[in-house]
Image (cartoon, grey):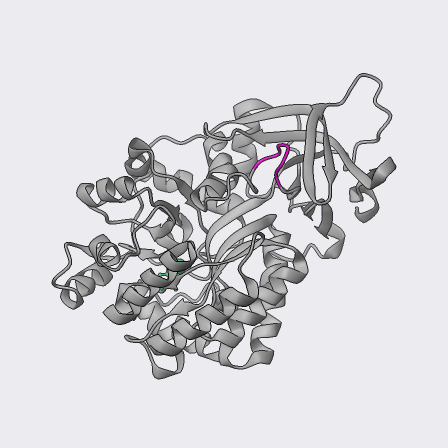
Amino acid sequence: MSAASAPSQAPGSQTILRGRLLCPDATRPALQEVPDGLVHIQAGRITAVEPAPPGCALPETLPGAIWLPGFVDTHVHFPQTRIIGSATGPLLDWLASSVFPEEARFKERAYAEAVAEEFCTALLRQGTTCASIFSSSDPGATDVLFAALARRGLQADVGLTLMDQGAPPEVLLAATPALEAAEALIARWHGRRLRFAVTPRFALSCTPALLRGAGDLAARHGLPIQTHLAENHAEIAEVGRQFPGCHDYLGVYADHGLCTPHSLFAHCVHLEDGAWDRLAAAGAAVSHCPDSNFFLGSGCMPLDAPRRRGIRVGLGTDVGAGRSFSLRRIAASAYDAALITGAEVTGEELLWLATAGGARALGLADEVGRIAPGLAADLIALPAPPARDGQVLCDALVHQRDAGPVWATWVAGAPRWTLADGASHGDR
Ligand code: GUN
Ligand code: ZN
């Protein structure tokens, strides 16, 4: 497998990949299949994509594979890697009994370093090459995570999780030191491949001063913003009690400069029509995390609400409330959630949401999420289901849970994970 997945080298150190390609469209939720294609790669980026010419002498890079862009996970928690499957929901109970004690461990650098390696490997093994990530509230752990992502060459938005109230003292960091630590992390890491994301955990974990400081920080540096919104009924009721002066849950963020075209709101399970309208008017995006919503019994986001309004949507694993790093599994859960809410969604649209749609939601449409010239050569090889094409192919890729694991994950034009690196349990 590793030999077969090695890229073919051509003169001038250009890499050329030959294989069956599934290419997401830039704007429409559609994929175009190229049955036998060449992807030209130079300096980590795609320079050209074309059908293989008749009589092409280049061997197929990985026979039997179908190539897609790497998956984009628009919402995942690094310090929850080791508590996946902790069945202590619903949300607020799960946070108190499973999440906060685990996240407190990330004050210890050696622990953060070990989990950061596990986390990056878990992303690559499932074909995720771009992610929007919550770290813990510890600046040292966040620095460790940035360093691990940089070593693997991954594309990521990473946030120091801001929380100065509503949790045990071990996981809280006051507004002033938190914002100072954020400035230092921005200076050290914020760039093209890795970006610093302003990350208030959720309204209940932040004082108004911290929310305002977060909004100012994002505006000053032009940073992406990520947080949770309207996930669970008890959470929403408590937000109403703590922020009586705000119009609603979205209003808490809007009043503190946190509802902008660079904002990404995870969940949005229980938003009213007016809030959906305001979210659309702000140009903000949504991370749909259906597996997490099922696991915590939160409900189902109505996919038609953002679709009707042209709101950008990506898929999120939300590990560790989500039970898997696999965007294919999350896509299948999104199908189940859509049916429950009366929406129709195809396997093709779901694969698009897991790639180009996610990249658009993160504002990274010109960087990742498609197999197209100018974009990063972040590509994955999946075992092609036998004798299938079109819609049936996409459905099979999403829904066949017993299909094999990801065969190879390339980051910036080089294989960073292949099946030979360890097909352990749970690869699908
Ligand atoms: N709301 C606040 N924090 C969290 C978290 O860690 N996970 C989920 N799913 N929701 C949250
Ligand atoms: Zn989350």
Q: Position of residue 316 (x, y in %)?
A: 44, 50
Residue name at image x 28 percent, y 75 percent: 166
Residue toward you, 423 or 261: 261
- Residue 35 lies left or right of residue 393; in this view the side is right
Seen in the picture, residue 426 relative to 285 is either above or below; the reply is below
Residue toward you, 114 or 257: 257
Residue name at image x 65 percent, y 30 percent: 21
- Residue 270 lies left or right of residue 315; in this view the side is left
> Mainly helix, strand or loop, the magenta region?
loop
Picture quarter containing residue 366? top right
Magenta run includes residue 374: yes
Residue name at image x 74 percent, y 47 percent: 414
Seen in the picture, residue 54 relative to 352 is either above or below; the reply is above
Q: Position of residue 319 (x, y in %)?
A: 47, 59
Residue toward you, 65 or 213: 213
Read off the magenta span: 370-375
- Residue 322 lies left or right of residue 270; in this view the side is right
Q: Position of residue 38 (x, y in %)?
A: 73, 29
Magenta run includes residue 400: no
Q: Position of residue 197 (x, y in %)?
A: 44, 59
